Image: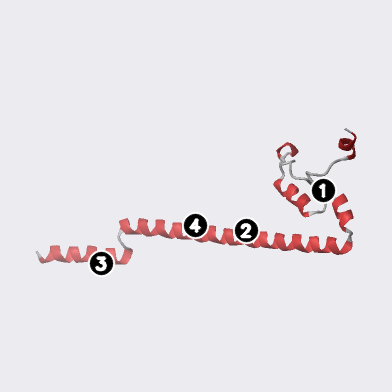
Amino acid sequence: LEKDDDDDDDDDDDDDLFGDDSTDGLQAEQKAEALKLKREKRELARKERRQQKLKMKQEKRKAQLRKAFEPVQLVENFCTDRDDEIRQKDVPERFFDWSVPFHGRKEGDITPEEEEE
């Protein structure tokens, strides 16, 4: 009987050295999931940094334009904040909200053609 007990002890030693197969699979999955989450977190941080850089670059560009040109010239050359919004939306003109006045005239103003009527 003593011989059988020694065999059981050898099996336990093997488990200690190589680990239990059922827990190895679980640990490997957990490690893979942890690496995946870490990678996603890094990618999100990278995207945020890129967006912040782009925003700073745009602000710098706007400041340079305001220093170099008169406001009328900026409007004529489509360099206003509203123009930038339109460029970023990148949708067809038919989807714009044309009820909001773009430049100059307000809703209550009367045009010379309307005065003649």
The three-letter code of the residue at mark 2 reads Lys
Q: Residue 45 location, x and y as percent?
A: 59, 62
Q: Which mark is residue 13?
A: 3
Mark 4 or mark 3: which comes first in sequence? 3
In what quadrant of the picture does the C terminus appear?
top right
Of badges 4 and 3, the one in the foreground is 4
Mark 1 lies on residue: 103
The three-letter code of the residue at mark 3 reads Asp
The three-letter code of the residue at mark 1 reads His
- Asked if disc 1 and disc 4 are in contact, CB closer than 8 Å, the reply is no
Mark 2 or mark 3: which comes first in sequence? 3
* Residue at horizontal 62 percent and vertical 60 percent from the top: 48
Image quadrant in which you'd find residue 12: bottom left
Q: CA distance from mark 1 to mark 2?
A: 35 Å
Of badges 1 and 4, the one in the foreground is 1
Q: Which mark is residue 64?
A: none
* Residue at horizontal 72 percent and vertical 44 percent from the top: 90
- Asked if disc 4 and disc 3 are in contact, CB closer than 8 Å, the reply is no
The three-letter code of the residue at mark 4 reads Lys
Mark 4 lies on residue: 36
